[in-house]
Image (cartoon, rainbow, N blue to C red):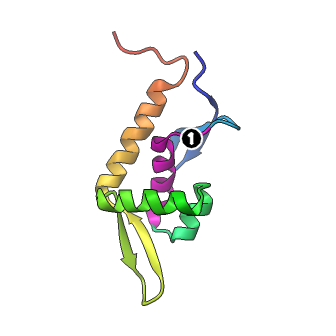
Amino acid sequence: MENGFSGRHLLNGADIQKPAVGRRRSSIEIIADMLRVGENGAGKTEIMYTANMSYSQIQKYLEYLVNQGFIIKVNIDHTLVAYQVTQTGLKLLKAIDTLMVMLEPGQNPEK
């Protein structure tokens, strides 16, 4: 059964899949990409470009992740804002990564 994943890459020691070219990412995949970028703190523009998102997407997802406590907004100075993943956000990212590995082709569910 094809799930749209064509390749894998290593990020922070975790073996993560990348969606196939031309396939739309799910909300979960977008959230995971954002959490990865924000692990060490990142500005909105860095998250947007690194996670390959539009401005409207970044606005919607950042608001959701901040409201849920997965990311916090950190004021660096009067004009500079960064976003940092919380411990809860890191737990969510780990759970998403585990789920993505379990769903990849060739994985046999435990019986």
Does dot 1 land on a helix, a strand or a loop?
loop
Residue at x-position 48% and y-position 30%? 101
Residue at x-position 54% and y-position 39%? 16
Q: Position of residue 54 (x, y in %)?
A: 60, 59
| Position of the C terminus by quadrant | top left
Q: Position of residue 52 (x, y in %)?
A: 62, 55
Question: Considering depth in this image, is 69 or 54 the residue closer to the camera?
Answer: 54
Question: Considering depth in this image, is 29 or 91 the residue closer to the camera?
Answer: 29
Please give the range of residues in magenta. 24-40
Q: Position of residue 95 (x, y in %)?
A: 36, 39
Residue for badge 1: 25
Residue at x-position 41% and y-position 34%? 98
The residue under label 1 is which amino acid type?
Arg
Q: Residue furthest bottom?
A: 78
Number of labels in the image equals: 1
Q: Is residue 23 above or below residue 81?
A: above
Q: Is residue 73 above or below residue 59?
A: below
Report which quarter residue 86 is drawn in: bottom left
Q: Is residue 105 above or below residue 62?
A: above
The crowding category of the residue bearing disc 1, from other C-alpha atoms within 10 Å (few below 14, some 14 to 19, many at least 20), is: some
103 with respect to 10 (left or right): left
Question: Considering depth in this image, is 12 or 77 the residue closer to the camera?
Answer: 77
Residue 30 is one of the magenta-drawn residues: yes
105 with respect to 98 (left or right): right
Residue 109 is one of the magenta-drawn residues: no
Residue at x-position 45% and y-position 14%? 108
Q: Position of residue 69 (x, y in %)?
A: 29, 59
| Position of the N terminus by quadrant | top right
